[in-house]
């Protein structure tokens, strides 16, 4: 993914902290093993990056990884911890055996479930994952571990109703209030700098 994706994660995945501006209680405090509730901590995240680069990202000022390719694995987690990185990742079997590890500060759904889903190489795309499935998965994740928040990263349809990538659910903004019932922290992607939709200027995308 491009560097732009990192800034999207920083800007939108952290909305609870933004909403809490001026409040006495840090919103992360409700999750004992979630992001640190220390007011001096502000999550700056990279998306789906190789753990082998964690030390370089740490030196650049980042402190959190979001998503790990085919992970988390023991090697990935050990590498991130060595660099002082925290991580929001999938709740796989390995992660469930490490619920006491403070490096894991949140769980996540699969990326952009609101977009048309691939049917496999050369087979085209099917409909998005239904909001009901996201809510059901959220409940399952929370039963396994209620001590961390769950992140849901959505696609461009949040801000662009006519986004073609939603397939059969294009122009259905009513889906989004239902999707966010399946998370604690919501984020979304949009690429205003490097993407031009037909009939729109980059500034309006």
Image (tube, helix red, strand yellow):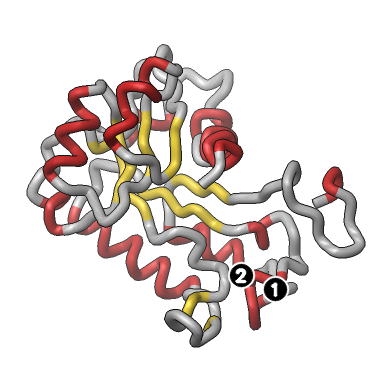
Left or right: 104 in relation to 12 = left
Instruction: Give the SS element for disc 2.
Output: helix
Say which residue appears at 58% left-offset and 34% top-offset. Answer: 7
- Residue position marked by numbered label 2 in the rendering: 175
Farthest bottom residue in view: 123
Left or right: 65 in relation to 193 = left
Left or right: 161 in relation to 75 = right
Spot occupied by residue 77 in the image (x, y as percentages of width and height): 19, 38
Farthest left residue in view: 97
Badge 1 vs badge 2, beta-carbon distance below 8 Å:
yes
Work out whether 161 lies above or below 31: below
Q: Quadrant of residue 178?
A: bottom right
Q: Quadrant of residue 30?
A: top left
Say which residue appears at 38% left-offset and 58% top-offset. Answer: 109
- Residue position marked by numbered label 1 in the rendering: 172
Q: CA distance from mark 1 to mark 2?
A: 6 Å
| Label 2: few (<14), some (14–19) or many (≥20) C-alpha neighbours in 10 Å | some
């Amino acid at each position: 993914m491009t560097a732009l994706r990192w800034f999207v994660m920083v800007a939108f995945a952290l909305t609870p902290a933004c909403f809490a501006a001026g409040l006495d209680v840090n919103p992360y405090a409700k999750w004992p093993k979630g992001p640190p509730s220390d007011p001096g901590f502000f999550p700056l995240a990279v998306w789906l990056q190789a753990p082998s680069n964690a030390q370089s990202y740490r030196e650049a000022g980042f402190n959190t990884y979001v998503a790990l390719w085919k992970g988390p694995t023991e090697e990935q987690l050990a590498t991130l911890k060595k660099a002082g990185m925290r991580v929001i990742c999938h709740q796989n079997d390995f992660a469930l055996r490490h619920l006491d590890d403070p490096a894991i500060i949140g769980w996540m759904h699969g990326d952009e479930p609101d977009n048309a889903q691939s049917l496999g190489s050369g087979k085209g795309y099917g409909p998005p994952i239904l909001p009901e499935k996201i809510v059901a998965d959220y409940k399952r994740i929370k039963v396994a571990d209620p001590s961390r928040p769950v992140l849901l990263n959505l696609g461009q349809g949040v801000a662009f109703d006519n986004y073609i990538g939603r397939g059969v659910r294009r122009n259905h903004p009513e889906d989004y209030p239902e999707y966010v019932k399946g998370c604690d922290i919501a984020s979304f992607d949009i690429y205003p700098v490097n993407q031009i939709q037909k009939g729109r200027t980059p500034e309006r995308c």
